[in-house]
Amino acid sequence: MTASNSTGLTRRGLLRAFAATAVAAAPTYSNAFGLLRGAGDIRALKMHSGRTGERIDTIYWIEGEYIPEALKEINRFMRDWRTNQVIGFDRRTIDILAASHRMMDTDAFYTLLSGYRSPQTNAMLRSKSRGVARNSLHMKGQATDIRLEGRSVSQISRAAISCSAGGVGKYSRSNFVHVDCGDVRVWGR
């Protein structure tokens, strides 16, 4: 039980109130991502898979701690849907997605077009398109291709770019944004 002071506020209540404006630092990454501005004490991911029809709406980080069960759920959701292979998806990319979503101030679900890709899937896609990298970060579970209802490719990419935490590719013709936790870089139109 949390002790309260004479105003009836608990320590936890004060922390939650402060979380809306707090600047949180990533607990395990030295770069501590500028992306976490406004992330507060809770980080959540809301996504719909355009390929499988599945949805995920989960809080995966609370008060400085990742929630293992939620991360397992995210890993499964981000799997290569063609091969059903699951890997541990990089938390940094998940954090970029969560922070970008908060910055855009929306309740809409991201639409996931591509998360993890097995080497076999990446090779198949590469044989059909020049736009697929040979050493894609998708194969390491470090990249996503997303859309967000009610937000343009420009709006999504600006939010991700403002995180200064990885690569952001803008694909306006195909109506999606690539977000990864690799080197900070920007490309596309």
Image: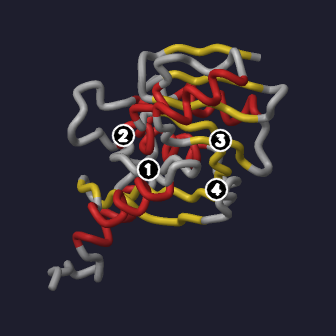
Tell whether 100 sits left or right of 188: left
Quick one: SS at disc 1?
loop
Quick one: SS at disc 2?
loop
Which label lies toward us, 1 or 3? Answer: 1
Q: Earlier in the sequence, mark 2 or mark 3?
A: 2
Q: Please say if the residues under marks 1 and 4 sit with CB atoms less than 8 Å apart.
A: no
| Point 60% across, 41% down: residue | 114
Q: Position of residue 164 (x, y in %)?
A: 47, 23
Kindly tell me whether residue 168 is visible in this rendering. yes
Quick one: SS at disc 4?
strand
For disc 3, the marked residue is 146
For disc 2, the marked residue is 90
As shown in the figure, which amino acid type bears the numbered disc 2? Asp
As shown in the figure, which amino acid type bears the numbered disc 1? Gln
Front position in the image: 177 or 89: 89
Alpha-carbon span between mark 2 and mark 1? 15 Å
Front position in the image: 13 or 52: 52
| Point 77% across, 51% down: residue | 149
For disc 1, the marked residue is 85
Looking at the rendered structure, which numbered label has been put on residue 49?
A: 4
Alpha-carbon span between mark 2 and mark 3? 16 Å
As shown in the figure, which amino acid type bears the numbered disc 3? Ile
Q: Position of residue 100 (x, y in %)?
A: 56, 40
Q: In which quadrant is the N terminus drawn?
A: bottom left
Q: Earlier in the sequence, mark 4 or mark 2?
A: 4
Q: Position of residue 165 (x, y in %)?
A: 43, 26
Bin the neighbour count of mark 4 within 10 Å (Cα to Cα): few under 14, some 14-19, many 20 and up. many
Q: Earlier in the sequence, mark 1 or mark 4?
A: 4
Alpha-carbon span between mark 1 and mark 3? 19 Å
Kindly tell me whether residue 18 is visible in this rendering. no
Tell whether 189 sits left or right of 42: right
11 shown above or below 180: below
